[in-house]
Image (cartoon, helix red, strand yellow):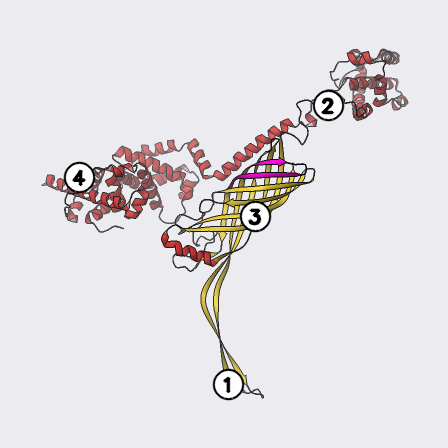
Amino acid sequence: MVQGCIREDRACQQELFQRYAGKMLAVCLRYARHRMEAEDLLQDAFVKVFDNMARFEFKGSFEGWIRRIVINTALKNYSKKSFQQEQIGLDNQPEHALSPPVYDNLGAEHLLNLVNQLPDGYRVVFNLYAVEGYSHKEIGDMLGVQESTSRSQLVKARKMLQAMVLETQKVAI
Amino acid sequence: MNKHHPLDEAFREQLQGLTVETPTHLWAQIEQKRNRRHRLAVWLGQHKPLALVGVAALAFGAAYGLWSARNPDLSAFPITPSAVVMHVEAIHDVKVAKAAVLGDEGAAAVLPSSTALLAEVSAPSSPAALQTLPAEPLSGQTTLEEALLIMPVEKAVADQAAAIAMPTAGHSATEFSPTVAPQKEAALPLLPAVYEAEGPGKKLGLFAIEPKCAEFGNGFWSFHLDLIASPDLAFNELQARDANYEDYAKSRQDTESRLYAFSSGLRLSVVGDNGLAFRTGVNYSQVTEKFTYFNGFEEDIRIETIRDNQGNIIGTDTIVVIGERYKVTRNVYEMVDIPFLLGYEFRGQRLNVSVNAGVYLNLMFRQRGDFLSPQDLTPVSFDSSDPEAFPAFKRQAGLGYYGSFGLAYKLRPGLSLLVEPHFKIFPKSVTQENYALMQRPMSAGVFLGVRKQL
């Protein structure tokens, strides 16, 4: 299929899109503010995937390669400013200890919705660190910010998410 | 993976593998974005060397076209016979026609040549006839009558022709045409003789150079082909990407030493009359180094028997030889580049001096050999043709800067001996970004070769 895509075979390209689009749209939804932006990101990312297919060296996971392109495309949407002008005010807020089952009860879509409510900088760092598994050093390199900035954004993102989860629980009770 | 915080883990578990439904219109929009124009742009971007070669070829084609246009081709030259030549031709036709009409083969054989006729018409008695001649070329099918009508040939000659033609009553002038035309064509090769008869001091219109016409081989552009080769002195600048790898960089420098390097190429130059030159072609360069790795000590134990005079074994001798073991590899780096150079030539009578500068676009960068692994400082192969080898180098080295000072000594017209001291530097690292070191190759040498003017 990859070879077919390199040869610009439309059928192969469509098959590849259908195979990975669902997963990649979910990735885009985590980085975008809303669904329309996520769909735009997905389109741009797949255009890049097809344009650069010949550069795939068949080393490592193909899905991982596509995911990396999708994430890079999403990151390009956010300038360094996003991380410098982020809202403050969460520094003195205590961190609530919530047990894992609380999150399990919420469901994937609800968690996705919570992530989308985070400010840009928090959301990106949280996604990269917590979901994708990048280190703060890697995040710093990717975003062009200090490691410490990444750490503080993550802490604030966690606090905010915990607060939102607690709020959800209160409403449920 | 960051698995420490429960919140992180909870989000990862639920979101990492999440799949959502994709709207069908997205694929159509992607196809729309990746239209033919977009694909062409991407292809050109991915094949920059090929695209640049294409552009260079087009530029050369255009330059060559311009050059050809300025240097006339004799076969296509608008030849307008001079009045004198036309007059001689007409007289010759008349006489050939006469011989044909009379069936007098002997007369045809003794016909005066165009040279003799030229002398005849150039006599002082006929200047008026020469002045009245039109400068229109004769058609190949001109008949005798037409020839007589359009050519106000000297009266005596015309009358003589008519008098001879008349007795063959019943033959119209047009009937002569099939015979006359080939005879007239046969007279044309005599034109050089006409030119000779004019003498060196007098130029005929046929060979006169038009005011706007460039001379052959001396147009606004001249093309040269250089065949060059050079022994080179090659260096590698090794720089650690990270302070942690500075020792590794030093270890590599200690284990690798220069052996020899050379480069050779074929270069096409377009040189303008103003001295500006554009050069391109193809260049191959090779750098050979020696990698020496100390592989520990080796002990060689030999036991020799000791015999007495009768040959009986009386004991043994143990010889222990301790030596150092080295792994030695010949490392080869090969490059194929396309030069794009601009130069300026100062022209002397026999010696042309030029200064050149530009870029070398690397098409291929290939390596084979061993170096120390950044992980454990043991030998590892970096052979570019082996997929299992350590992937340290890029496939293409990018752009290199080139500068040279050329001397071209004219051996004979169109052929010069070329001596060109030069240097070449690749400013960007030729190693991959995830490799511990940045490596920038540079070389200097003296090209020796020949330059042929095309």
Is residue B343 highlighted in magenta? yes
Q: Secondary structure at mark 4?
A: loop
For the record, the magenta segment spans B342-360
- x and y, in percent, of residue B5 in the image: 20, 49
Residue B64, how many percent across, how many down? 60, 31
Identify the main secondary structure in magenta: strand
Q: CA distance from mark 4 to mark 2?
A: 94 Å
Q: Quadrant of residue B149?
A: top right
Contact flag, marks 3 and 1 (Cβ < 8 Å): no
Circle 1 crowding by C-alpha within 10 Å: few under 14, some 14–19, many from 20 = few
In the depicted structure, whether residue B317 falls above or below residue B66: below
> Can the viewer see residue A110?
yes
- The kind of secondary structure element at disc 3 is strand
Specify which label sits upstream in the sequence, 3 or 2: 2
Which amino acid type is shown beneath numbered disc 3?
Answer: Gly
Label 3: few (<14), some (14–19) or many (≥20) C-alpha neighbours in 10 Å: many
- Residue under numbered circle 2: B208
Q: Are marks 4 and 1 in contact (CB under 8 Å)?
A: no
Q: Nearer the viewer, residue B93 or A83?
A: A83
User: Pointer 1: what residue?
Assistant: B315
Compared with B44, B138 (above or below) is: above
Per the rendering, the mark at residue A89 is 4
The residue pinned by badge 3 equals B445
Q: What number of labels is visible? A: 4
Percent across and percent down for residue A51 are 40, 38
Does the stretch in magenta take in B1? no
Report, in whole angstroms, how far the alpha carbon at label 3 lies from the one at label 2: 49 Å
Q: Amino acid at mark 4?
A: Gly
Q: Where does the image place residue B260, in percent across and percent down from the top left?
A: 55, 54
